[in-house]
Amino acid sequence: MEAACSIRAAGEADLAAVARITAAAYGPYVAEFGAPPVPMTDDHAARIARGETFLAEIAHDPVGLVSLELHDDHALVFSVAVDPPSQGRGLAGALLRFAESRARGAGRRELRLYTNARMTRNIAIYLAHGFRETGRRPHPHRAGWTLVDMAKTLDRP
């Protein structure tokens, strides 16, 4: 069942909510990986200031986010995070569809992302939303980690 949510650009006043959602969503991986996943160490304030982070809200309560970077030939989903109590309600799909719409609106024909190979649940979500695996590579800054690169070709608007 998909939750009805609204998605809006995050502002400076949303920094604590972005940090909270990110920590809650990625926190369970810290013990497994031996270090925090990269989105947990990101400069959220800078990403918000660049207009790259968007919050999903239910009844004005922030419950998820997507961070989207626009590059010359594609858009990159840097992070999709849903607060654990709100997971399983279709919010990740809503955030991915929002990212697709933003990318299309900016004239991009491809949406890319990468994730840790051990995040198998996330990989399954991305595959279910039309992404395909394009390769695997060692993480450039975290020894022993493998990244899964994924992409989705976007139809023209």
Image (cartoon, helix red, strand yellow):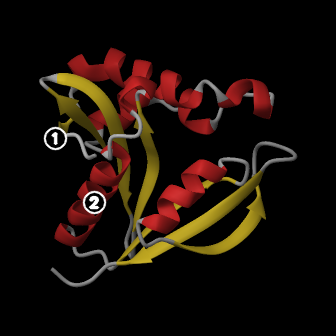
Sooner in the amino-acid sequence: mark 2 or mark 1? 1
Q: Percent position (x, y) of residue 111?
A: 40, 69
Q: Is residue 9 left or right of residue 34?
A: left
Label 2 residue SS: helix
Give the CA separation, mark 2 to mark 1: 14 Å
Quarter holding residue 52:
top left
Marks 2 and 1: which is nearer the front? 1
Q: Residues within 10 Å of mark 1 (few under 14, many from 20)?
A: few
**Residue drawn 50% across the image and 30% down it:** 25
Q: Which residue is mark 1?
A: 4
Q: Which residue is mark 2?
A: 97
Kindly indicate whether the residue at mark 1 contacts the one at mark 2 (C-beta within 8 angstroms). no
Q: Percent position (x, y) of residue 30?
A: 70, 26
Q: Nearer the viewer, residue 29 or 36?
A: 29
The kind of residue on which mark 1 rests is Ala
The kind of residue on which mark 2 rests is Arg
- The dot on residue 18 is none
**Residue drawn 66% across the image and 52% down it:** 120
